[in-house]
């Protein structure tokens, strides 16, 4: 291990290298190195033509992964999500680099496959979506379709189809640590999430590549207890101390460091959310849960409303709330701090969380929706021509028992369309997997049935035609028509109890 400056570390990145970087929103992002790569490339033209791989989105709409949206710096981006990256999204949409979008959990798992020398991941995740090679193969712009290699293929085993995500060599691995000792041992004790630091380091090392760690602080030999070491020093080649930790090594976008994100609850209740349409949607969504359910929430309306809705109803202890970053329990942060919770009960590695999800461990997931079509398919990954990506959406929605899409009917874009622009959620696969699927809005609730969508609930005071007039295709209307609970539209709701789990109900693998 050698301590290096930012320019010295970046000089070790050769042109054309495949670079794997860690992070989730701004958590775990090595901002000093990202910033340095952009600055040095603009000054010298190197390193250039990089293939940059990232499992999760890494930005706050301003910095982080946005540094790589410079023509010539990246030849190809292989990632899952660019929703918080307006520059990168536009950059890829303009075809200034090849764009390959793969599910977040599969990319996270690939780091471990590469580290172990395995040929890749074999899974049913991605079948029937735009990642399926018979549809788009994850190649989401024309340069990728013209030049990118195939990252996925279809394999048949015992008569069943599987997606095969191929391993690849990693030349440079970049991650960050809260502290690094003189031997290069890295601790992430002050980081809000664990993510993929160890897997990236192992994958790069075993690929014959270089491992670079950004450190918030350097400590003496022996200052890190062995059990607190996330990445052993034997795997680390270069350590760069962040020159400006307050700006370049923030725990989250909103905080340089706040113990609330890594500490259990002290029993002090957090303030309740104010009423909004988004909160009303979250309130209705949680009424589909049962006591003891293990639940995932996605970004957008679910991330902003489901946790607060549970908290105000005093139900936070009745279910286990999880986020794909590896967090269990607590009250989720939203918007650009999505991925963390206040007072979590556990924080586990990113890939381990997806192993649990992909294996069918989730009772329910709450996700947003950009477009819904007549078959019940959902698009969240390409909207208004903008390349957004899927994040963990495909992994999670193809494996949860209940999938609940939360979105508003009001907005600048039509939510119901005859055909989605991109197939991020396959209704056909959901039926094969025997999943329950709901679409919850501020005006009505829809369900996925064998022959398409059905209107099953309507908001108080609305006529059915008020809702149907906003949909460009015929929707079955379930009779008798149920009414959405009146109290979800009030300023406050009284605490209530969730029903017990039905006999024999468990979160198990469905159709897998």
Image (tube, rainbow, N blue to C red):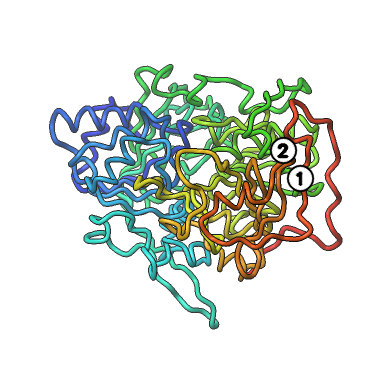
* Residue positioned 16% across, 37% down in the render: 46
Neighbourhood count class around disc 1 (C-alpha, 10 Å): few under 14, some 14–19, many 20 upward? some
Can residue 410 be seen here? The reply is yes
In the shown orientation, is residue 49 left or right of residue 293? left
Can residue 510 be seen here? The reply is no
In the shown orientation, is residue 482 left or right of residue 422? right
Q: Which residue is mark 2?
A: 283
* Foreground of the two, 143 or 120: 143
Looking at the image, residue 274 lies above or below residue 25: above
* Foreground of the two, 317 or 192: 317
Quarter the N terminus occupies: top left
Looking at the image, residue 70 lies above or below residue 444: above
Q: Which residue is mark 1?
A: 287
Q: CA distance from mark 2 to mark 1?
A: 7 Å
* Foreground of the two, 224 or 269: 269
* Residue positioned 43% across, 47% down in the render: 55
* Residue positioned 37% across, 63% down in the render: 137
Residue 124 x, y percent position in the rendering: 53, 67
Residue 107 x, y percent position in the rendering: 44, 53
Give the total number of marks visible in the rendering. Answer: 2
Residue 272 x, y percent position in the rendering: 71, 23
* Residue positioned 67% across, 26% down in the render: 263
Quadrant in the picture for residue 283? top right
């Amino acid at each position: 291990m050698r301590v290096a400056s930012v320019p010295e570390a970046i000089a070790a990145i050769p042109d054309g290298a495949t670079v794997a970087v860690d992070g989730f929103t701004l958590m775990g992002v090595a901002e000093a190195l990202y910033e340095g790569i952009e600055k040095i490339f603009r000054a010298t033209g190197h390193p250039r033509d990089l293939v940059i791989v990232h499992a999760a989105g890494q930005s706050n709409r301003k910095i982080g992964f946005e540094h790589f949206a410079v023509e010539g710096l990246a030849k190809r981006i292989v990632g899952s999500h660019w929703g918080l990256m307006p520059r990168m999204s536009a950059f890829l949409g303009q075809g200034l680099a090849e764009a390959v979008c793969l599910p977040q959990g599969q990319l996270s798992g690939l780091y471990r496959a590469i580290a172990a020398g395995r040929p890749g991941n074999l899974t049913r995740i991605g079948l029937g979506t735009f990642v399926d090679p018979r549809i788009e193969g994850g190649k989401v712009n024309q340069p990728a379709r013209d030049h990118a290699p195939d990252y996925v293929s279809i394999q048949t085993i015992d008569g069943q189809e599987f997606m095969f995500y191929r391993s690849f060599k990693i030349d440079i691995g970049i991650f960050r640590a809260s502290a690094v000792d003189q031997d290069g041992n890295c601790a992430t004790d002050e980081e809000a999430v664990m993510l993929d630091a160890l897997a990236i380091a192992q994958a790069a090392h075993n690929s014959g590549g270089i491992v670079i760690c950004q450190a918030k602080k350097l400590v003496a030999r022996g200052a890190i207890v062995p059990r607190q070491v996330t990445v052993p020093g034997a795997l680390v080649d270069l350590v760069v101390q962040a020159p400006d930790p307050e700006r370049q090594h923030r725990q989250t976008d909103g905080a340089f460091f706040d113990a609330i994100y890594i500490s259990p609850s002290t029993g002090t209740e957090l303030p309740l959310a104010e009423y909004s349409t988004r909160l009303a949607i979250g309130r209705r969504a949680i009424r589909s849960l049962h006591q003891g359910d293990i639940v995932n929430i996605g970004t957008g309306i679910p991330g902003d409303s489901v946790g607060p809705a549970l908290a105000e109803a005093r139900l936070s202890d009745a279910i286990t709330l999880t986020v794909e970053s590896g967090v269990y329990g607590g009250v989720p942060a939203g918007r650009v701090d999505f991925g963390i919770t206040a007072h979590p009960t556990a924080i586990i590695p990113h890939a381990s969380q997806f192993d649990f999800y992909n294996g069918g461990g989730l009772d329910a997931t709450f996700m947003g929706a950009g477009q819904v079509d007549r078959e019940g398919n959902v698009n969240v990954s390409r909207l208004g021509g903008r390349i957004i990506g899927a994040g963990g959406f495909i992994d999670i929605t193809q494996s949860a028992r209940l999938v609940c899409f939360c979105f508003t009917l009001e907005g600048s874009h039509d939510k119901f369309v005859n055909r989605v622009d991109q197939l991020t959620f396959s209704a056909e696969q959901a039926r094969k997997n025997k999943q329950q699927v709901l679409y919850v809005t501020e005006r009505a609730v829809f369900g996925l049935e064998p022959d398409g969508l059905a209107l099953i609930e309507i908001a108080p005071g609305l006529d059915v035609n008020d809702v149907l007039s906003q949909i460009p295709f015929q929707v079955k209307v379930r009779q008798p028509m149920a009414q959405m609970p009146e109290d979800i539209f009030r300023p406050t709701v009284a605490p209530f109890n969730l029903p017990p789990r039905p006999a024999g109900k468990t979160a198990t693998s469905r159709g897998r």
